Image: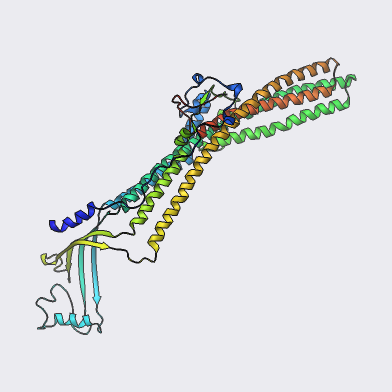
Amino acid sequence: MATRLLPLAALLLAGCTVGPNFTAPVPRAPDRWSRASLEAPAYARSRAEARAVDETWWEGFHDPTLTWLVITADQGNPDIEEAAARIAETRQQRSVAYAGFWPTVEANASDTRLRLSQNSPFASIAGGQVSAGGGGPPNAGQGLAIPTGPKPGFAIYQGSFDAAWELDIFGRTRRGVEAAEADILGAERLLDNARLSLRAEAARTYLELRGLQARQAIARQSLRLQRDNLGLTRSRFTSGFATEVDVANAEALVASTESTLPLLDAQVTQAMNRLARLLGQEPGTLSGQLAAPAPVPPAPPAVAIGLPIETIRRRPDVASAEAALAAQTARIGVATAQLYPSLRINGSIGLQAGNTANLFDTASRFFSIGPSLLIPIFEGGRLRAQVRLEEARQRTAAIAWRRTVLDALHEVENALAAYYGDQGRRDGLRRQASAARRAADTARTRFSAGLGTFLEVLDADRTRLSAELAVAETTAAVATDLVAVYKALGGGWQPGGAGPVATP
């Protein structure tokens, strides 16, 4: 027996894993971010002022409500639960792939009744074996109930354990496990990406909500001033110091501002509902917690953004695309192994008899063991077509990876450009709003003293309201832009002494 196993052992030791081995692709990334997205002379600070931004980047806003929203969203969002379920699914797929390394054992019991054709040559042979005093071999019919006569037939009762073990000589099972491991890694990175997107969306929506509430407060304050102007204008009209046109213009401005409040109220409600959806809750559940207005939390003083290649390596979507490429590369090996012979060791042990009376006798025992070699010769081109299919899928996965890298680079550049651009716009609007408030106060004072026209008051008040609303909007935009920067960078960056600094 040992001598028979030697050739088999030699063949197993000589086995190899067919198909290409995966090599992690090298991303093409610039040495640094473009000057257009990094230059901001009005906001430049030293690197020493930059503080590390880790995965809990939302804490840099120092807003307890924002922190609570982000943490709660992680726990209740159905998208996160779905991504986690996919990880469990891929782990079960790995278990299925690992099962290929082990033999299969099955229990088999059968009760088979056979009737031979009377015109078959086997019928005469069977009949001759059981004929009385026939010339058949000794004990030819023992254990088989083969009746004589015109309808030859018999019964077979059998119970057995059957085992089969396919040796993974060419690595088909190993490549399958390799693909399953890569699928698990890809699912884990997809979960990371889902968490990153969820946190960024929760933070962005909350900051937009605070910006809308600030615009609400500005509109209501302006409405109070405009109503005061309307009362003053009517009083001056009664005294003959203002015209009916002035009164109509004052009424029109009040009505215009009043019309903006329902829209802002609706947008605030929608923002609260979006946050509730992100937290996996029903609409309106956050109204009590978020209805009280609060200022837009200020952005951190400085953010270290790292280098492009570091960002690419850190982003979970790029890592997921790379894992998908690795899995598809392994599947080429699975398909290639199908072109090679497969060696199986088959074994069976059990009991077999022609009737139940002697089924459990010692003489009814049987066993068989031995290797079988299956060599594919003609499959109509199916096996080679499967290899070419997996190779085409690998090329598609490689293109998807390159596209993901390119999109990531553009996302960071665009987020930085928007971040700096909105900062400049916000500072300009702040100066405009300050000047507009002074102009509105001066125009109202002049009009009250009878030195100016109501048209001056009207124009100055419109300019002031527009500028203050724009400041509130851009203040929220700067904060949401920074959230977009964090998301584009892969959730935060721990600077290691290298990399530019993004500063507001």
Residue at the front extreme? 31
- Front in this rendered view, residue 302 or 280: 302
- Residue 374 in sight here: yes
- Front in this rendered view, residue 19 or 269: 19
* Image x and y of residue 489, in percent: 50, 33
User: Considering the image in quadrants, where does the N terminus appear?
Assistant: bottom left
* 414 on left or right of 115: right
The residue shown at (74%, 21%) is 436
Q: How is the image coloured?
A: rainbow
Judge whether 180 appears above or below 354 on screen.
above
* Image x and y of residue 492, in percent: 48, 30
- Front in this rendered view, residue 135 or 500: 500
The residue shown at (39%, 57%) is 387
The residue shown at (56%, 34%) is 413
- Front in this rendered view, residue 221 or 285: 221
- Place residue 256 in its image quadrant: top right
* 166 on left or right of 74: left
* Image x and y of residue 119, in percent: 25, 84
Residue at the top extreme? 449
Q: How many marks?
A: 0
Judge whether 80 appears above or below 110 on screen.
above
User: Considering the image in quadrants, where does the C terminus appear?
Assistant: top right
- Residue 480 in sight here: no
* Image x and y of residue 77, in percent: 48, 38
